[in-house]
């Protein structure tokens, strides 16, 4: 079975400082991994996805994530936080090998950006 | 504009009163899905559909029904709502397998069952 653990429920950073949101996954096969962002009172938007190509994945708005199979991690980073980055972020795993074609979401990390 | 729409956006109802939340996409996507979002639990899949007349259970299907009679529509039906179904619901669609393609999410429906 697949699962996702987001290691921090809340992260607070100052504007202009780096962002690190941590995600560990468990999967029986070669998974696809995603990060989605949810701004207040909005739907979810895809930030980036990993599907077994390059291990360093670049996404929108300056975010990137690195797939590390040995550590079963897929942490999300950004060099310099902006006020507009304040939102909830979800790490998501899909395990096509299970045949269910479903996504499993982590519990979310709320990012606060202080001025 | 390519989008997923849901109606209603907000709904307050009482226990046992049947309701339907509609979902429609204009991108000709094959795959559609319903999720519920609860604090601290992320999103959990209720049902999904690979194509017209093809639906299957997700992680939390109890108390819900779906149908896929047309490619663009995927309504969520609560035959007898209960307070534990109070939640934020999202419909999503994608061109193919959810694990490969980006899913496009609707704006959400906030349901309160009294």
Image (cartoon, rainbow, N blue to C red):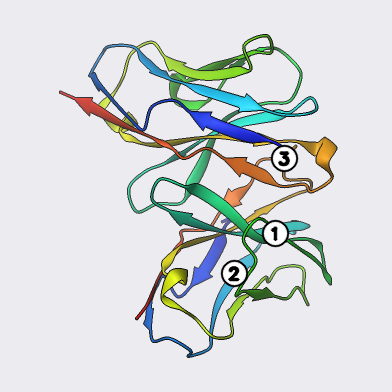
Instruction: Tell me the quarter of the image containing the N terminus of chain B.
Output: bottom right
In contact (CB < 8 Å): disc 1 and disc 2: yes
> CB of mark 3 within 8 Å of CB of mark 1?
no
Residue drawn 60% across and 31% down?
A34
Q: Are marks 3 and 1 on the same chain?
A: yes
| First in sequence: mark 3 vs mark 1 | 1
Subunit ID for the residue under disc 2:
B
Of residue B101 and residue A20, the one placed in the foreground of this image is A20
Identify the residue position indicated by label 3 in the image.
B101
Taking the spot 77% from the left edge, 47% from the top edge, the residue there is A101
The CA span between labels 3 and 1 is: 12 Å
Q: Is residue B81 above or below residue A16?
A: below
Q: Which residue is mark 1?
A: B32
Which quarter of the picture shows residue A96? top right
Task: Please name the residue that numbered disc 2 is placed on.
Answer: B23
- Badge 3 or badge 2: first in the primary sequence: 2
Front in this rendered view, residue A1 or B76? A1
Real-space CA distance between mark 1 and mark 2, rounded to the nearest whole angstrom: 9 Å
In the rendered image, residues at marks 1 and 2 fall on the same chain: yes
Q: Position of residue A69 (x, y in %)?
A: 69, 13
């Amino acid at each position: 079975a697949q699962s996702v653990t987001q290691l921090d429920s809340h992260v607070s950073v100052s504007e202009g400082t780096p962002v690190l949101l941590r995600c560990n996954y468990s999967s029986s096969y070669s998974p696809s991994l995603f990060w989605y962002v949810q701004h207040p009172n909005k739907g979810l938007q895809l930030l980036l996805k990993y599907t077994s190509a390059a291990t360093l994945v670049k996404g929108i708005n300056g975010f990137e994530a690195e797939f590390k199979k040995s550590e079963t991690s897929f942490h999300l980073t950004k060099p310099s936080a902006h006020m507009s980055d304040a939102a909830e972020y979800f790490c998501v795993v899909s395990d096509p090998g299970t045949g269910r074609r479903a996504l499993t979401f982590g519990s979310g990390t709320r990012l606060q950006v202080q001025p | 504009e390519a989008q997923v729409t849901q109606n209603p956006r907000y709904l307050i109802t009482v226990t046992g009163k049947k309701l339907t939340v509609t979902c429609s996409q204009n991108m000709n996507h094959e795959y559609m899905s319903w999720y519920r979002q609860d604090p601290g639990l992320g999103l959990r899949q209720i049902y999904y559909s690979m194509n017209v007349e093809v639906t299957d259970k997700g992680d939390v299907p109890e108390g819900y029904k779906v149908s896929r009679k047309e490619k663009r529509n995927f309504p969520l039906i609560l035959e007898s709502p209960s307070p534990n179904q109070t939640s934020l619901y999202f419909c999503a669609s994608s061109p193919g397998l959810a694990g490969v393609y980006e899913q496009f999410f609707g704006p959400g429906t906030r349901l309160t069952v009294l």
